[in-house]
Amino acid sequence: MAQEVVVLGGGVGGTVVANQLARAVAGQIDAGEVRLTQISASAHHVYQPLYLYMAFDQANPAEGRRPQASLLDPHVGLITASAERVDREQRDVVLAGGRRVHYDYLVLATGSRPAPEQVPGLQEGGHWFYTEEGALRLRDALLAFTGGRVVLVVGVPHKCPVAPLEFTFMLDEWLRGRGLRDQTELTYTYPIGRLHSLEPVARWAEPVMAQRGIRTETFFNVERVDPQARTVVGAEGTTLPYDLLVAIPPHSGQKVILDSGIGDKGGWVPTDRHTLQMVGDDHIYVCGDTTNLPISKAGSTAHFEADVIAANLASRLQGGHGSARYDGKVVCFIETGLSKATYVAFDYENPPQPKEPSALLHHMKLAYNRMYWLTSAGVL
């Protein structure tokens, strides 16, 4: 009987795991010894980092969307359906409508979702770029903007940890290019006592903000938004008026994780930081945003974790022990405007050190946005 491997989730982590594993055990799949299945709620794969560029009318939705089936190795079976829960006792994934998909090994790569509904008034009074619809709404709001007070607020946890900085720096340059910066008060807020959760990044960002005349407000945890008064209120008692409110919404894990009883209250799955196995179940691996690990929820995190998970699953399917370990590696580009970027690379042991921004790094990020389709498909 074939060993059943199920990858739940069609984002970057799930797709990289499926493709790398398919290539590693192709012979076993051909021999009927292994069956590899991916379950994706959508027939389309979306490259979410393009949402930031959509907000500035620099990308369109079609550029960031491809059929999921076109990215998968032929050895991967694709089921397009919503998963309702994971039955760990029976080792089944239960789909909408009651169909069950059995697994011997399961990869949870369900990702995260923006949850603006957690902040009263935010859905009515704010804008964000974490969904296609939200990015296009923000694009229209920016194109109609003629000056005033722009406030950026940050909810936690959220994916793409450098996105608040990227948006703020890009907006500053965007406004300057339209002759609106002198008519705009731009305020960047952050929930803790510095400008970013990563201390070296915060130290780097502080003089950049000051040089560009961007106001900063730390210890600002958004509590509620008043769309009529156009104010945002922080839990610490500060109230900021706005003409345009841009939010990095708090994020949560997916409903299937909560309904399965395998996550914490936020929907994050307890995960071993090195093996990437679910704590208490060595038949389940966890990838990307789905983990509860205290590291960046970013595409590169999911990709590096996927490398480890695929290697360990291939080893175990071939009689090994699966001893590859994840070291916490993350690499993030940071747009510092519309024409320059920097990057940070770090892991569990080595903190990030932002490099000098350059046009070359900006174009490298734009190039990766196009190369992504090859990396996710396992071509590069």
Image: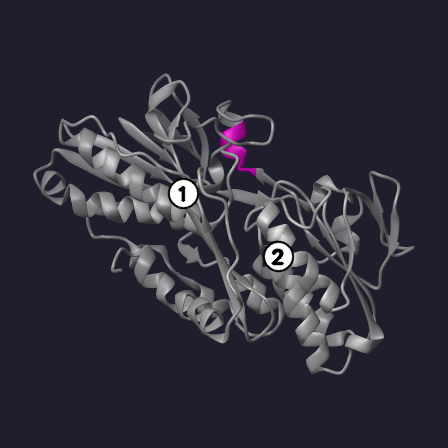
Image location of residue 334, percent across then percent down: 54, 61
Would residue 220 appear left or right of 254 to someone viewing this image?
Answer: right
Residue nearest the observer in this picture, 302 or 283: 302
Name the kind of residue labelled 1 in the image.
Gly
- Residue count near mark 2 (Cα–Cα under 10 Å), binned few <14, some 14–19, many ≥20: some
Indicate whether 237 appears above or below 129.
Answer: above
| Total number of numbered discs in the rendering | 2
Amino acid type, mark 2: Trp
Q: Is residue 103 visible?
A: no
Q: How is the image coloured?
A: one colour
Eye-nearest disc, 2 or 1:
2
Tag 1 residue: 9
Q: What is the x, y in percent for residue 317?
A: 17, 31
- Residue at 64%, 62% in the rendered image: 167
Q: Earlier in the sequence, mark 2 or mark 1?
A: 1
Give the magenta-colored segment's residue range.
253-258
Helix, strand or loop at mark 2: helix
Tag shown at residue 30: none
Q: Is residue 292 left or right of residue 373?
A: right
Q: Secondary structure at mark 1?
A: loop
Residue position for label 2: 204
Residue 311 lies in magenta, yes or no? Answer: no
Quadrant, the N terminus: top left
